[in-house]
Amino acid sequence: MTHVPVRLHSWLRLQREGVPLAARADALCRALQDCPEVRRAFYLSWQPEARLYSHAGAARHFPPGQGDPALASDQRLFEHLQQVGRLDLAQVRHLDCWLAGRLRRAAIRHGQVFELALHAGQPGLLLIEVCEGVSLDWLGWVHDLLTTLLHSANGTLRASPLLGHDPQPSLLLDAQGRTLECNAALLALLGDKSLAEVPGLLPVNHRELVRACLEQQRAIDGVEAQCQAQILIWTFIPDPQDQRVLARCRDATTQVLAAREAATARRLYRLIIENTTDLISRHTPDGRFLDASPASWTLLGYWPEQLRGRLARSLFHEHDLHSLVQRARDALEQDGYHTMTYRIRHCDGHYLWFETASRAIRETYTGAVVEVVSVSRDITARVQAEENKRRLAEVVEVNTDPVLFIDPQGQVTYLNPAARRLLGIADAQPLPELAALFAGDDLARLQRDGWSSAERDGVWSGDARLQPLAGASSVPVSLVLLAHRSAGGERYYSLVARDMTERELREAQQRRHQDELAHTARVVTLGELASGIAHEINQPLAAVVNYANASQRYLQSLESNPQAAEKVAQGLQRITHHATHASQVISRLRAFLRKGQRRMQALDFAEVARGAVRLCAWEASNWQVTIEDRLPDNLPPVYADRVLLEQVLLNLLRNAIDANRERHPGQPSLILMAAQQGSAGNVEITVHDQGPGVSESQLAQLFTPFYTSKPDGLGLGLSMSRSIIEGFGGELEARRQAVGLLMSCRLPLAGPTRQPQE
């Protein structure tokens, strides 16, 4: 019962202050409940008209008794208490009264009831329930004590001048910080808590504060204490004469939390302002800087201190100045906000594009603009990007090459004027389907190869033919397909086409010129091979003459020599063989000298190569040069023109013969001619001589037109040969060797998709 006297002191103060009965009853019950032996305490006042005891205070009420409430009465209990003053609860429960039934239903068994009048002229009873097994003898002492204190309070004591009717929760503390007395407001603040928890309401250092307050004889104000979710602000007022301190508090939970939130918000706003890349500034109504965020240094090269007091318009570009200032002022006056785009001068002197959003702050009563808050950002990159886009759009519009925009579904979404002209589509005419714009299988090739290559590499190029809608002839074009990706990751495409009609005509003309030149070269070559050709033709003709003369002689002796008929038949057979050989030689010469368009077809390379060897065989043997044939018979066919390929091989062989003759005059030498199938879908043919070879500088110029190392050469043979081979889709190159020079020619294979063509 350590805290009972303290509680009784507070109850006595309330009693003599004459506070409402409910407050006094609650204070008394709390004081008694601080005793560990007491389970509950209740004060009930007597209602004479109803003849019932009713609860006074905030304690939980008993349940109603048994029987008809209209017949309820505690008159017998009232009269009995007036006689004896105190009864055990066991006695009360057996009385014929309404309260007895209520106690039975509330299961209140062990304790006593006292007759006690807290309010003069209004009887009442105090019910104390104690724990089971606790003796009831000491409750008589409590009854006597309360009666004595009550008489003293009603008779001689007066209200404390320090606490009085203070509406704020207050208490008296001694010099050691112990609680002496508390007022009703503090008791209400405690609620159901005991007085032992009063220190939990005080600041954790309240003892030091009390000591400092008394020693310095000054009040200490604004001390914060946290009690769970509640925040109290305490004031300590010293009473040096009695060595006491009056502690008063107020609930500042809402105020403190709001202040904390405001401080957090201010720190957050300051953090945002100091770290944002946008310039946040405050201005007077006429545009003078009041303050600026640190971004002014990174954006404009000015520190905030340099901008304060400066007119913002002094930094504007002169072309933007007059229109911007008046328009911004009018918008802020009328609407309260304004957004503008303008040029502003950097500290270094160059101009930047700014976008500024401003809002007016008005005076509460007059509505006049007193300040302007602005947020500005550097949009120079955006303006330049928009300018570049505009320029690119103009370039696309005026470009002479057709440009088509295609969406992810393959639909045409835009045609520039050049594309409309090429395809015969008027401006008002709807855009066609992509399939209607391509001739032949070009669309399938674009869809098969173009889309995937563009998505993988970003770009794809190829040749195709566009089909005008008016039914005109298709137009050859060179296509470039570009793949783009939108901000959402979706693919779309741009198709740029270049009209290749003129190039096609030039290439056809170039091919004609090349064919003419090749024909001329073949005529020159045959002229150079005339001796060998004459020898090759003369041999079969001489044999024909000899066999004809012999046959005539056998015919003249036919009558005398019957076996001569068989000799004549043999002679005629040999004449036919040699005449056929001469005819084949002439046919090859005529084919070699053929003039006309090239005929691309599948060829047996070994057959063509051996034909070229036969044309220069006499010349090779004349210079003791042996051409060794290492050509396999199972080579796949190549795709080329027979005559032109034979011309290239003949040129390579004759160059090799000349090189061997230069290196080995009057001595035998060897030329190796070989071929093999390559890994890249081609056949590689090599001609390796035993000549003097070439230097690095000579190798670099070997295929240059009119470059030659021969005194009587024109320098066109190798240049023309490379052009012919590249026209077949192949390659011709020279490689230096330890001995001589190796000429390598790679020709494409004749696949199933390659058809003979002219």
Image: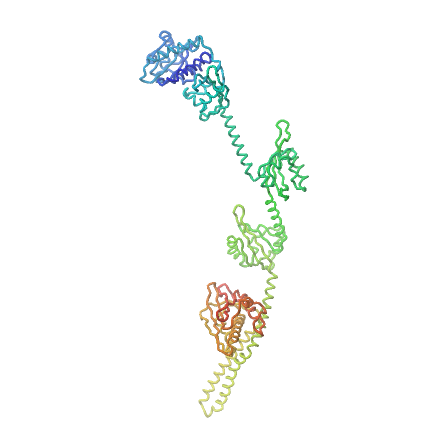
Image position of 477 (left or right of 635) = right
**Residue lying furthest left:** 133
| Quarter the C terminus occupies | bottom right
Q: Residue at x 46, y 85 (%)?
A: 570
Q: How is the image coloured?
A: rainbow
Q: Nearer the viewer, residue 264 or 673?
A: 264
Lateral position of residue 425 relative to residue 618, left or right: right
311 in relation to 421, above or below: above
* Residue 228 image point, x, y percent: 44, 26
Quarter of the N terminus within the rendering = top left
Q: Is residue 513 visible?
A: yes
Viewed as shown, does residue 585 lie left or right of 31? right
- Is 203 located above or below residue 399 in the figure? above
Please say whether residue 584 is visible from this viewpoint. Answer: no
Q: Position of residue 582 (x, y in %)?
A: 52, 80
Residue closest to the eye, 269 or 357 = 269
Percent x, y of residue 329: 66, 35
Q: Residue furthest bottom?
A: 560
Closer to us: 424 or 667:
667
Position of residue 465 measured from the top left corner of the image (x, y, whole percent):
57, 59
Given the current orientation, which residue lies at the most extreme front position? 215
Which one is in front, 356 or 569?
356
Q: Is residue 118 above or below residue 521?
A: above
Looking at the rendered structure, the number of numbered marks drawn on it comes to: 0
